[in-house]
Amino acid sequence: MANRKEKTFRFIIVGGGIAGVTCVEQLSSQIPSADVALITASPHIKTVTNYRQVSKTLEEFDVEEQPSSVLEEKFPNLTVIHSAVKSLHTRSHSLETTDGRVFGYEKLCICGGGRPKLLTQENPYVLGIRDTDSAQELQKRLSKAKRIVVVGNGGIALELVYEVEGCEVIWAVKDKAIGNTFFDAGAAQFLIPSLETNKPEKDTPCKRPRYTTEEPAPGGSHTFTADRNARRQGSSSTEAGSALGPDWHEGIVLQGSEQGTRRVSLEYQCEVEKIFTSEELLNSPPQTLGHENVGSWPVYIKLTNGKTFGCDFVVSATGVVPNTEPFLHGNNFALADDGGLQVDDHMMTSEPDVYAAGDVCTACWEHSPMWQQMRLWTQARQMGWYAGRCMAAQVLSEPIELDFCFELFSHITKFFNYKVVLLGKFNGQGLGSDHELLVRCTKGLEYVKVVLSGGRMVGAVLIGETDLEETFENLILNEMDLTPYGEELLNPNIDIEDYFD
Ligand code: FAD
């Protein structure tokens, strides 16, 4: 293998996603003379644009798909190789691509991302969403669909059920409340009315909300119907050419085959028991099928709450698994429980000269008490950036400390058209019963939750235009004892920003 090497690069980065591209940019600017190769399976690369540091740790940016030539023009010492890595040989410091070429490296960074954790493999009626291609496939299939079943309770499922129009959506979640990855039941209740109202046009607030939600019974279901008479006039839900990014659905029309009502029915606390074709269903014991006949849908899904639904297809939005497979054979990588490549506080894997960043890796250093890993754009960028710095620092024999961005978990996003900011242990992660919550909620306007432990703020969920993120971030980072303030902390009549200035 060593003899077949076409070329040996000082640095090879595998993966043209956010982590890989940021790593390349960082390395190439730190050591402009170094030979860098980016090997990526996808024809386009993902770049960060419009980067904005919102506060000490909060950041916002757009993600754009661009031709790799953009990167090569910027960094003359960079070579982009469009092929997938088939195998890695850490002992000979080389890797082989699917088109049969072998490249050597001095230092390698694996940024191969994740792949959807599909409910079932190779079922043409089960779709996962990962990249532009799969999002476009969803759009195509949706345009002919009358009913889909969405399974999952993370960010993708949340965005999808909100965005789909003209198609009935049955949403199966395994938890008691929606959005369990990001919220508690209180925040979920705050957001749920948005499912029965129509999407506001661009940023204008929705004028006709109707509230009819009740607490779901365990294993129970919940249906929301939007009043189509209140639909916006003449608006288009997409702008052609927009790239897949944090607002990945904005570039594609998520419109079903019907013009009528938008309906989302929730099935709580259930998982998928079985997925059948109509023939398989005919040959199986009688099912609870409601009013529809067997055979009227191409696929049927049986949930663990005993209900079976027919639909045009199932969207499996049950998370991602680290895409480690091509790199493992013949090597000795330490893997974390979630299947990711274990990395230390210098983004190094257990194999010499091999680093990893983004969705493919699992941060196995001792975390700051306010930080946890979540497979998100922001962390992919931060890890890629930091891995690039660590690789350069090692070559230049410079010391480097864990970056400040790993001090506090922070994420800014949008769900159901509300701004959402998550800070620290926003769901009391890992705190057991050793915490208390303060909540302030104004229906349709804002939801503010603060997590306190030992009198100190350790996390927060801010939904709506609360303008509290910077103050709360400071309070968390300063570890100030807030016991004297008690519930006044969330008193809407106190300008908390001035208070703690
Ligand atoms: P990826 O972006 O997955 O990139 C991996 C790269 O590796 C790709 O270029 C791939 O082609 C390449 N590759 C893989 N295997 C090989 C191989 N063997 N050889 C060569 N190249 C290879 N996060 C948010 O923060 N906000 C959101 O709103 C959000 N929305 C999302 C919506 C969807 C539909 C999905 C799927 C994810 C979303 N995420 C979101 C999560 C976010 O996309 C990921 O955390 C992030 O993209 C991870 O970046 P990455 O660079 O590690 O991996």
Image: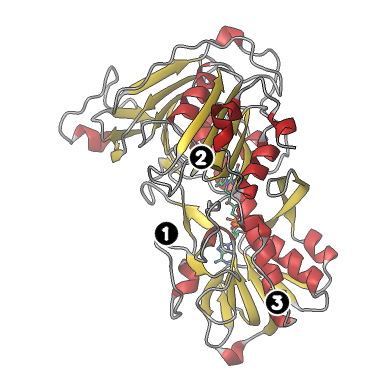
**Residue 329, image x, y percentages:** 44, 76
Q: Nearer the viewer, residue 45 or 192?
A: 192
**Residue 179, image x, y percentages:** 47, 35
* Inter-mark Cα distance, 2 to 3: 36 Å
**Residue at the spot 69% in from the left edge and 57% down from the top edge:** 45
Dot 1 amino acid type: Asp
Q: Is mark 3 within 8 Å of ligand 1?
A: no
* Inter-mark Cα distance, 1 to 3: 30 Å
Q: Which of 495 and 274 is in front in this view?
A: 495
Q: What element carries label 2?
A: strand
**Residue 67, image x, y percentages:** 75, 56
Picture quadrant where residue 238 is located = top right
Whether residues under marks 2 and 3 lie with C-beta atoms below 8 angstroms apart, the answer is no
Looking at the rendered image, the quarter that the N terminus falls into is: bottom right
Which residue corresponds to mark 2? 452
- Residue lying farthest bottom? 3
Q: Is residue 150 above or below residue 118?
A: above
Which numbered circle lies on residue 248? none
Q: In this view, does 120 lie to the left or right of 415?
A: left
**Residue at the spot 52% in from the left edge and 87% down from the top edge:** 91
Q: Does the residue labelled 2 lie within 8 Å of ligand 1?
A: no
Dot 3 amino acid type: Pro
Which residue corresponds to mark 3? 399
Q: Is residue 164 visible?
A: no
Dot 2 amino acid type: Leu
Which one is in front in this view, the residue at disc 2 or the one at disc 3? 2
Which residue corresponds to mark 1? 338
